[in-house]
Image: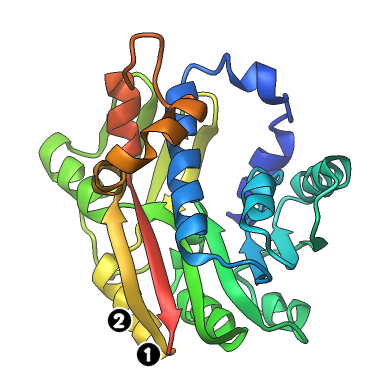
């Protein structure tokens, strides 16, 4: 599965900002960026040291710049993506120190690669579901993340909303979606709580890749075992509405709305498949 995911993201080209504006899911991508921006600005402080797991092609570098962090350690399983992220960092003349590494971020290698750092924030955006292929992999990942953080530090990110996904599975059967996304399960039985695989396709983003459900009570319980207390776990739509009034100018600048001042309904539905989370190390 890891090779499949790495190959998929390595093969996706870096097309630049102007081309991304032509994406058929541009409003959804902009909304996702808005949610990530809110999370980072809410919990980050100037001078922080950050571990970004599954950094991709460096799409959040500007967010860390705006947060005025001191140092970034960025990792991803896709080596081509890591190279592109490092190139973006160099071209962007970012005012913080950065280290880039290509590795399976949910393997035991992570522990050795982050030795010597103490992180104020660990960020995993749209990738933590890959750890849920087994209980061992989840526990190992959360243990390493917690051990690498300072007391009071934050583990934050964005994950598939298992409650919504399972609800749609019950209502529509093994395969469901709309014009921009499709989810396909292999079976309806959702037991045990790890390794619950489905196939996800998102127009102009993800080409029928395997993902795993993250049962929210299981995530909260295991995180607590490793000294991480829940601060925030909210569906994207709720998070959006809670920040709507005082973030309207930011939303407009980030091009969340189309020419009619709306988010197209199918993109809005697809965005509802996700939740934002944050844990604090106690």
Q: Is residue 61 above or below residue 204?
A: below
Residue name at image x 77 percent, y 77 percent: 113
- The CA span between labels 2 and 1 is 6 Å
Q: Nearer the viewer, residue 93 or 233?
A: 93
Q: Secondary structure at mark 2?
A: helix
Q: Position of residue 121 (x, y in %)?
A: 57, 71
| Residue under pointer 2 | 221
| Residue under pointer 1 | 225
Q: Position of residue 86 (x, y in %)?
A: 83, 49
**Marks 2 and 1: CB-CB under 8 Å?**
yes
Q: Is residue 4 above or below residue 195?
A: above
Q: Give residue 258's quadrant in the image.
A: top left
Left or right: where does residue 81 sit relative to residue 221? right
Left or right: where does residue 5 sit relative to residue 189? right
Residue name at image x 37 percent, y 55 percent: 276
Q: Quarter holding the N terminus?
A: bottom right
Q: Quarter holding the C terminus?
A: bottom left
Left or right: where does residue 224 sit relative to residue 153? left
Q: Is residue 252 above or below residue 74?
A: above
Q: Is residue 195 visible?
A: no
Task: Estimate how packed mark 1 is, as few (under 14), some (14 to 19) or many (20 or more) residues with alpha carbons within 10 Å.
Answer: few
């Amino acid at each position: 599965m890891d090779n499949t995911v790495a190959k998929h993201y390595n093969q996706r080209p870096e097309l630049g900002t102007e081309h991304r504006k032509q994406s058929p899911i541009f409003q959804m991508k902009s909304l996702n960026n808005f949610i990530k921006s809110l999370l980072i600005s809410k919990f980050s402080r100037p001078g922080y040291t950050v571990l970004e797991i599954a950094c991709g092609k460096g799409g959040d570098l500007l967010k860390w710049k705006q947060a005025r962090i001191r140092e970034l350690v960025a990792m991803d399983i896709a080596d081509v993506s890591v190279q592109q992220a490092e190139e973006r960092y160099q071209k962007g003349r970012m005012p913080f120190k950065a280290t880039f590494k290509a590795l399976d971020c949910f393997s035991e290698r992570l522990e050795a690669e982050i030795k010597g750092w103490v992180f104020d924030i660990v960020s995993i955006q749209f990738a933590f579901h890959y750890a849920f292929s087994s209980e061992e992999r989840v526990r190992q990942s959360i243990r390493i993340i917690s051990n690498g953080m300072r007391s009071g530090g934050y583990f934050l990110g964005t994950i598939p909303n298992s409650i919504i996904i399972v609800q749609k599975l019950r209502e529509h059967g093994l395969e469901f979606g709309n014009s921009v996304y499709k989810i396909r399960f292999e079976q309806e039985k959702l037991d045990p709580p790890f390794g619950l695989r489905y196939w996800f396709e998102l127009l102009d983003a993800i080409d029928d890749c395997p993902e795993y459900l993250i049962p929210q009570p299981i995530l909260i319980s295991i995180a607590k075992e490793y000294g991480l207390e829940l601060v925030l776990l909210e569906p994207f739509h709720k998070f959006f509405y809670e920040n709507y009034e005082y973030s309207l100018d930011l939303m407009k600048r980030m091009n969340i709305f189309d020419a009619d001042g709306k988010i197209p309904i199918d993109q809005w539905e697809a965005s509802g498949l996700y939740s934002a989370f944050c844990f604090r190390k106690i």
